[in-house]
């Protein structure tokens, strides 16, 4: 399965007084790219939720390589470095659409839980089809 | 009852590339001041909610008089120009704490509804004590 | 000139605990739609700035008709109710892309100023081509 | 020198549809706590800037231990695990003010640069007093 990078235009309201996109906004962009990624693989957020499961963020990291400015358009490539029964890691690579220059890399770590009682679950048991899909994409 | 202005420090992440607080953040500040106002009059948001009622925003307006910059501290004075059975208007006056200069004025319009079924309610019937309080503060 | 409505997907991080898009985010959406509108008419923000002129927000208003939820896609139609020498008003109409239902309407008021010294200018004198374009679009 | 934890009230507009503070907002809180920390040690952001130096964010990480909800007040304790000539690491520990429960930990990594030409500088050379202060606080 070929994942298409998420395309995002940097907005004026995302700039700060240094004239660049404020570092916190990349966390929003990662989320947008993640949501888009799930839709691309046929498991949009609503479908996962309708199966009674949701994701929580356990942690994240972000490395800022070069600034993005208002009006720039970036590509965000989502990858799955690892997926276990109950946890997974997603990574992100933000590049400038015109020049290909690397802007930011990042990672979010998630666990799966049941919406009904907020208890962690094994994705392998809860949605085996999605688990197998994540595994195949994570190249494990 | 004497309402104390809400004190807010303008944050770096609220600036934009013009070097001033981005205009959308004032809507957040109005909300903070409104929440603080409810707490000051003895009806913090949680108490209103525990009585089964909540507020929705019907509309708002904002006039920008002069910019606020990172590091500035502002005072936000909350007023109640009008309160009816089912709707109310709240207004805001943002001034610089050191100079007293006017920065922004604004208004939010709300209606009351029952949390249980999302139906609009008469605040006068639902929480008469709060209704009377709002009326006395609105100087109607 | 036919203006194409701006398309915006509502994001998870824009929701609040009521399960709907928080009312302050519409101000961001208006800005995105405004920037897109300027690009559509051939005067992207960077071009206006390169001509030494920029826009400031004098005021805004917003009316919330029905909620937008995470995953919804909206259309934002931008209009120019009025444009004078030194000030203009832009309005916005947010509708659900699938159902056409009205979600939000709003308005922002702007004035033009010179970047160089932050002084208000007559757009008619500063960028007559853009002034004429705004006038023709505003149907005045 | 005794650093007082930064006190922050979680706001309604910071919640998401899961009913908790959205994970991206902690990055804002870290920034607020960092700005407050600099003020506490006698080098508020404006003073550092007036000396021609500023900080850039190289990277960050955040671990989410338990959720914060609207109305909660947290303490954010700032520490300096390391400070070199040109880079420093700041860490953050967010706890609930009433219960002391750990909510979030995080880290931001910074380098120093000259405002004038955006070139990285040695803080030791640029502002030796601040460098010595950071070193003493970092317990190196």
Image: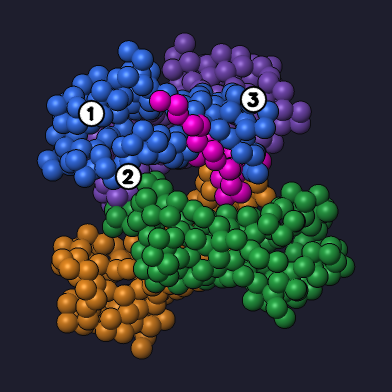
Chain colours: A purple, B green, C orange, D blue
**Please, what secondary structure does the residue beneath circle 2 have?**
loop
Residue D74 or residue C28, whichever sits in front: D74
- Tell which circle, 3 or 1, labels the residue nearer the N-terminal end: 3
Nearer to us: label 1 or label 2: 1
Residue at x 53% of width, y 19% of height: A88
Chain of the residue on which disc 2 is drawn: A
Q: Position of residue D87 (x, y in %)?
A: 25, 24
Specify the label residue A21 is tagged with. Answer: 2
- Magenta stretch: includes residue C28: no
Task: Sort mark 3 into few (<14), some (14-19) or many (20+) by Cα contacts within 10 Å.
Answer: few
Q: Is residue B94 rendered to the left or right of residue B119?
A: left
Q: Residues within 10 Å of mark 2 (few under 14, many from 20)?
A: many
The chain that hosts pointer 3 is D
Q: Which numbered disc covers residue D129?
A: 1
Q: Residue furthest front?
A: D1
Describe residue B14's horizontal placement relative to residue A57 as left or right: left
Q: Chain of mark 1?
A: D
Give, as a single range, the part of the protein colored magenta: D1-25
Query: Residue D33 versus residue C101: which sits nearer the camera?
Result: D33
Q: Nearer the viewer, residue A125 or D96?
A: D96
Q: Quadrant of residue B127?
A: bottom right
The disc label shown at residue D101, or none: 3
SS for dot 1: helix
Q: Is residue D8 magenta?
A: yes
**Are the residues tagged 1 and 2 within 8 Å (C-beta)?**
no
């Amino acid at each position: 399965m070929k994942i298409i990078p998420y395309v995002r235009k940097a907005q004026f309201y995302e700039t700060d007084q240094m004239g660049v996109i404020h570092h916190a906004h990349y966390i929003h962009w990662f989320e947008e790219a993640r949501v888009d990624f799930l839709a691309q693989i046929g498991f949009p957020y609503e479908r996962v939720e309708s199966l009674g499961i949701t994701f929580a963020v356990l942690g994240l990291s972000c490395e800022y390589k070069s600034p993005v400015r208002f009006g720039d358009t970036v590509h965000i490539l989502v990858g799955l470095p690892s997926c276990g029964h109950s946890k997974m890691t997603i990574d992100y690579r933000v590049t400038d659409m015109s020049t290909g220059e690397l802007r930011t890399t990042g990672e979010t770590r998630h666990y799966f839980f049941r919406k009904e009682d907020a208890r962690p679950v094994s994705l392998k048991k809860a949605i085996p089809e999605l688990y197998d899909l994540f595994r195949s994409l994570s190249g494990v």
